[in-house]
Amino acid sequence: MLQQTFSHTPLYVWAILGFLVYRGVLASRAREVTLRKLCIIPLVMLALSLSGVHGSFGFAGLAPFAWVAGALAGAALAWALTKTDTIVAIPQRGSVQRPGSWVPLILMMSIFCMKYAVAVTLAVAPAYAQASTFIVPACLAYGAFSGIFLGGLLRTVAVYRAAQTEGWGQTRRGNAPQWGAFRSRGD
């Protein structure tokens, strides 16, 4: 059964998996990244999440409400847990320096596996697409994963905006009391 499941998986799914693993490994290293590039993974995760909800359950009934509730909870959690003192804003280059973390890879693999598992479950048991006991937890989880990525992005953008406003284009580290601590690219 497992071999049949994998053999019926479209090739583009494996390409998405490869892209997510690549981006997750990149996120494991401390690096300077532009705000534009920083938006890629949250937007990809948002698209995967919403396509999972729409493709599996549609945007009618409980599904979108459960997704929004999960997204808000995930965003609030990420906002609260993002360590802003480890983010170095570099407004003069339109970038931030982020510490490395394996958490993005874990989250990306979680949403990918969940989307895959939901698709397989619905292929085997299509009636679950109408069962609120399946819809609500799945959509809550889809939303929570997207919310975590979006909340982390919004927190990073807030640090960046604060550096632009307060530092007049100078490099700034998070919201820690080091407002006068300027860093060069070599630091």
Image (cartoon, rainbow, N blue to C red):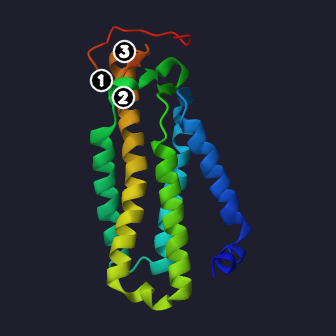
Instruction: Look at label 1 and name its amino acid.
Output: Asn
Task: Determine the secondary structure under disc 2.
Answer: helix
Instruction: Look at label 2 and name its amino acid.
Output: Val
Instruction: Look at label 3 and name its amino acid.
Output: Gly
User: Around disc 2, counting alpha carbons within 10 Å, would you say few (fewer than 14), some (14 to 19), or many (20 or more)?
Assistant: many
The circle on residue 167 is 3
- Report whether 185 appears left or right of 166: right
| Picture layout, residue 30 above or below residue 62 | above
The circle on residue 159 is 2
**Camera-side residue: 133 or 161?**
133
Find disc 1 in the rendering and name its residue. 175
| Picture layout, residue 11 above or below residue 72 | below
Measured from the top left, where is residue 121 in percent x and y?
Answer: 51, 80
**Camera-side residue: 97 or 91?**
97
Measured from the top left, where is residue 77 in percent x and y?
Answer: 29, 47
Picture quarter containing residue 93?
Answer: top right
| Picture layout, residue 125 above or below residue 146 | below
How many numbered discs sit on the rendered protein? 3
Are the two marked residues, 1 and 3, in contact with CB atoms closer than 8 angstroms? no
Earlier in the chain: of badge 1 and badge 2, it is 2
Are the two marked residues, 1 and 2, in contact with CB atoms closer than 8 angstroms? yes
